[in-house]
């Protein structure tokens, strides 16, 4: 295996060669990536089934299809995005023209997690390539089958100087972070996000941090309860709850307490049958330590439905609990598994107080028919992104930037936002040499001072 240093040198050399500058070259390599992903769809589905017992449908929708779509759209818009953008010039700089050039940062690092291990490495890669960078990817060691097939697709699609995958655990990651990258894009936990940002600070490397947190769902008494239950159960139990934007816990208006919790349990059965362990639509916990962690949450409340588990297969039944203490681990840690604590409110201000007393979440979900209620919650809370009357789906619109705020992250991507994230804006002003208005030059005078005040006030 090549040393990290030599991989880095190779990426830097390739970048310096200028090979990634032509936009046509970027489009061509993205198309190669598209074709190789298409050709390897079944292998990707098999790898995710081995790593997460992920249903083929979910793998296509959330790992393969989503990145194919992103590549297609990026290729069709890239020439427009990459064009220098003309901007106006203030009168006091007469005569001049101004524009902004989008330039690649250089050699960038992408570190990805295990829960959507294909999509969360490839999606930022699309932006990084579109912007003309060379890229090192460090996928998660916890989803080794997916990391392996991804590495093979990357090797087929790109020169090793353009994109290289370096696999390994924390030790490898630590070694990688000692290199001087021009940009770091990290997706993972808040704890590791801090480590990455510290390492980046050593080299003054800019970062995007796509982190996690506890994303609440608020269900008001006037919501369409049947649809709300369906959409919460879908967003929560997809990938067995191991989704960064899954509703972490649910705040329900007291008047609909029984009706709504019963509906949640009914929908779980409708989706996964009376024994979800036999359902082909339900994933498993990624490994033993995450399994044990999430299993321990079940006992921290009273089980409304679900609650069973299987140590051998790392199965945890879709579970709803109530009465968990705000100080319990299930209400303090990001759950990242198929346990949904529910809480109740009479006055929405108590729910908002609870949410606002905690770090800003990655996502927030509001279920209500009232525009005033929706607006009130939007105004009174901060979150990386919001979906009203559904869960998760704000992230599939490439016209919306996806990212966190505060503890749930910084920066954003998807669609053009990915291209912008991986591009540095270079502002350029071209001055005419035909006219030179002299009022800025010393010696200063009262007239010059009056003129400057006329323009800049
Ligand atoms: P993690 O932070 O443990 O690991 C992420 C990556 O960092 C992995 O590649 C891992 O090898 C590497 N890593 C781990 N420890 C490291 C260290 N000390 N130094 C350097 N690198 C290190 O996260 P995870 O368990 O893989 O993923 C789950 C977390 O990611 C959850 O918090 C989830 O909310 C978050 N997440 C966020 C998004 C998002 O888009 N915002 C998406 C998916 C997951």
Image: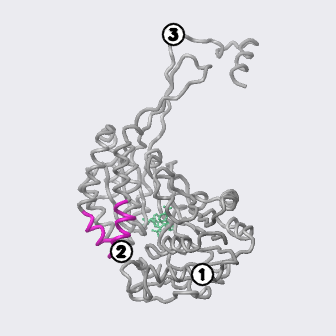
Q: Residue at x 69, y 56 (%)?
A: 379
Depth check, front residue: 373 or 335: 373
Instruction: Using residue 47 as the reference point, say whether residue 108 is left or right of it.
Output: right
Instruction: Decide: is 295 above or below 218.
Output: below
Residue 85 image position (x, y, % from top left): 46, 32
**Closer to the N terminus: mark 2 or mark 3?**
2
> Distance from label 2 to label 3 (Cα)?
68 Å
The residue carrying pointer 1 sits among few (fewer than 14), some (14 to 19) or many (20 or more) residues within 10 Å by Cα, namely many
Marking on residue 261: 1
Secondary structure predominantly adopted by residues drawn in magenta: helix
> Distance from label 1 to label 2 (Cα)?
26 Å
- Secondary structure under tag 2 reads loop
- What segment carries the magenta color? 40-65
**Circle 2 or circle 3, nearest the eye:** 2
The residue carrying pointer 3 sits among few (fewer than 14), some (14 to 19) or many (20 or more) residues within 10 Å by Cα, namely few
Instruction: Please name the residue that numbered disc 3 is placed on.
Output: 434
Instruction: Decide: is 311 above or below 374.
Output: below
Depth check, front residue: 175 or 331: 331
Instruction: Please name the residue that numbered disc 2 is placed on.
Output: 55
Instruction: Using residue 138 as the reference point, say whether residue 32 is left or right of it.
Output: left
């Amino acid at each position: 295996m090549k040393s990290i240093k030599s991989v880095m040198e190779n990426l830097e050399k390739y970048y310096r060669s200028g090979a990634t500058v032509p936009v046509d070259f970027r489009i061509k390599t993205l198309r190669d990536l598209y074709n190789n992903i298409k050709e390897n769809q079944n292998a990707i589905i098999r790898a995710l089934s081995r790593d997460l017992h992920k249903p083929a449908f979910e793998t296509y929708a959330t790992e393969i299809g989503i990145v194919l779509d992103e590549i297609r759209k990026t290729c069709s818009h890239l020439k427009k995005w990459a064009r220098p953008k003309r901007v106006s010039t203030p009168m006091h700089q007469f005569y001049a023209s101004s524009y902004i050039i989008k330039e690649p940062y250089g050699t960038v690092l992408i570190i990805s997690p295990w829960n959507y291990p294909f999509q969360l490495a490839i999606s930022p890669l699309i932006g990084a390539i579109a912007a003309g960078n060379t890229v090192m990817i460090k996928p998660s060691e916890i989803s080794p089958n997916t990391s392996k097939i991804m590495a093979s697709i990357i090797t087929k699609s790109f020169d090793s100087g353009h994109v290289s995958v370096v696999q390994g655990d924390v030790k490898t990651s630590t070694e990688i972070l000692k290199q001087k990258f021009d940009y770091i894009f990290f997706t993972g936990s808040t704890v590791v996000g801090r480590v990455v940002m510290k390492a980046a600070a050593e080299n003054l490397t800019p970062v995007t941090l796509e982190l996690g947190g506890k994303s609440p769902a608020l269900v008001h008494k006037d919501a369409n309860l049947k649809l709300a239950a369906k959409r919460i159960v879908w967003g929560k139990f997809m990938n067995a709850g191991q989704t960064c934007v899954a509703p972490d816990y649910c705040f329900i208006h007291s008047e609909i307490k029984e009706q709504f919790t019963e509906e949640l349990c009914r929908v779980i059965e409708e989706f996964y049958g009376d024994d979800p362990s036999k359902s082909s639509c339900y994933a498993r916990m990624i490994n033993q330590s995450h399994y044990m962690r999430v299993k321990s949450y079940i006992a921290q409340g009273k089980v409304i439905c679900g609650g069973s588990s299987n140590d051998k297969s790392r199965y945890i039944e879709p579970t709803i609990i109530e009465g968990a203490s705000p100080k319990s681990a299930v209400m303090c840690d990001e759950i990242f598994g198929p346990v949904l604590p529910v809480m109740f409110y009479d006055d929405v201000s108590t729910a908002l107080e609870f949410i606002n007393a905690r770090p800003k979440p990655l996502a927030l979900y509001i279920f209500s028919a009232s525009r005033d209620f929706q607006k009130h919650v939007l105004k009174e809370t901060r979150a990386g992104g919001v979906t009203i009357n559904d869960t998760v789906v704000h992230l599939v619109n490439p016209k919306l930037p996806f990212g966190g705020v505060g503890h749930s992250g910084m920066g954003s991507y998807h669609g053009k936002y990915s291209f912008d994230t991986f591009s540095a804006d270079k502002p350029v002003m071209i001055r005419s040499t035909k006219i030179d208005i002299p009022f800025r030059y010393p010696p200063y005078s009262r007239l010059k001072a009056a003129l400057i005040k006329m323009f800049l006030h």
